Image (cartoon, rainbow, N blue to C red):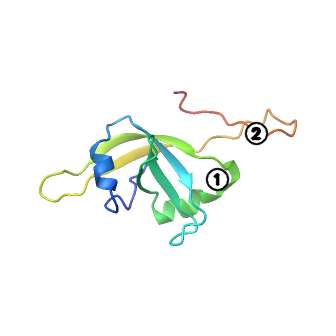
Amino acid sequence: TTKPVGVSFDNRQEVIARMQMGDRVWLDREPDNPYDPNAIAVCHSNGQMVGYISRDLAACIAPYFDAYSHPIKGRVTALTGSQWDGYTLGLVIIFKLPKLNHNNNNGHTPSFDDWDND
């Protein structure tokens, strides 16, 4: 569980204003990000950017993303802030790194156990 950072840049506040608890988000590695080589973007299921995983957490989990080489899904568990009086909107998300399914030893791309089946 974490709160994405960078939610006040570009049009991210407008994207978050239309989100609801339970919405799907995707976490995707950005190894070529010029500001952080461990960057992990957080996007709404419609592809719109909402922010990034914090620099410290991204540094810890970027190697997992690199090993899995695909986006990881998560969900919005809370919306924070207010549109009134200048408060910044934000969100809390939950995600889980998938576990490698070791049953596939025939040289094909490994599959991953899915913690969230929908």
Q: Amino acid at mark 1?
A: Tyr
**SS at mark 2?**
loop
- Residue at image location 57% in from the left, 33% down from the top: 115
Q: Which residue is mark 1?
A: 64
Mark 2 surroundings within 10 Å by alpha-carbon count, few (fewer than 14), some (14 through 19), many (20 or more): few
Q: Which residue is mark 2?
A: 110
> Does residue 96 appear in this view?
no
- Is 111 above or below relative to 44? above
Mark 1 surroundings within 10 Å by alpha-carbon count, few (fewer than 14), some (14 through 19), many (20 or more): some
- 68 left or right, relative to 27: right
- Residue at image location 45% in from the left, 48% down from the top: 43
Q: Amino acid at mark 2?
A: Pro
Rendering coords of residue 63 (x, y %): 65, 58
- 81 left or right, relative to 11: left
Rendering coords of residue 53 (x, y %): 46, 57
Label 2 to label 1, Cα distance in Å? Answer: 14 Å
**SS at mark 1?**
helix
